[in-house]
Amino acid sequence: MKPFAALTVSVAALSFVAPAAAQFEKPEDAIKYRQSVLFVMGQHFGRIGAMANGKMPFDAKAAQENADMVVILAKLPWAGFGPGTDKGRETKAKPEIWTEQAKFREHADKMAAETVKLAAAAKTGDLDKLKTAFGDTAKSCKACHDNYRNK
């Protein structure tokens, strides 16, 4: 009975930690997924940016809602950068994503951490704090784009 229980626990554990990329039937599905998530994240981030840059009136509630969405979305696209997803659909991703995976992941983690700070700043309702956090988050996005995204 013990071997069966150990096997059951192992299988259950693996189902939680198995790469999300395994969920994609084809590389183009993973590419479409990551592009879609990054697009939606950009839409929410752009709304915050418009407020931070004075292009639209500051709305603390809207800023907080959008920042909360950015935090959630910032966790999602990385599963779409698995092995074999460098080809299969038109993409702006540079090959360095797959040859420098540790550095790429560092950029993703940095950006995710900055989005948490952005959400915290948005919760204060203070436009100046939001502007600062937005700038820091934008810098983390740009750093990754500069290194890992073709124009």
Image: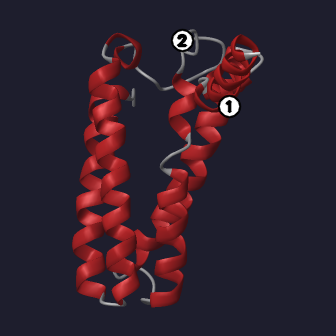
Residue 83 shows which numbered tag? 2
Residue at 24% in and 52% down: 139
Q: Which residue is mark 1?
A: 32
Residue at 28% in and 45% down: 110
- Could you classify mark 2 by the number of other residues whose Cα lies within 10 Å: few (under 14), some (14-19), or many (20 or more)? few
**Where on the picture, by quarter, is residue 12?**
top right
Residue at 59% in and 35% down: 34
Relative side of 118 to 92, left or right: left
Relative side of 28 to 71, left or right: right
Q: How many marks?
A: 2
Is 142 situated above or below 149?
A: below
- Seen from the viewer's position, the closer of residues 90 and 104 is 104
Relative side of 75 to 8, left or right: left
Residue 136 shows which numbered tag? none
- Seen from the viewer's position, the closer of residues 136 and 108 is 108
**Where on the picture, by quarter, is residue 6?**
top right
Q: Amino acid at mark 1?
A: Lys
Q: Position of residue 55 (x, y in %)?
A: 40, 79
Q: Position of residue 85 (x, y in %)?
A: 58, 15
Is 20 situated above or below 141?
A: above
Q: Earlier in the sequence, mark 1 or mark 2?
A: 1
The residues bearing labels 1 and 2 have C-alpha atoms spaced at a distance of 15 Å
- What secondary structure is marked by label 2? loop
Residue at 54% in and 38% down: 77
Q: Position of residue 48 (x, y in %)?
A: 43, 72
- Could you classify mark 1 by the number of other residues whose Cα lies within 10 Å: few (under 14), some (14-19), or many (20 or more)? some
Q: Position of residue 19 (x, y in %)?
A: 59, 24
Is 129 situated above or below 87?
A: below
**Where on the picture, by quarter, is residue 108?**
top left
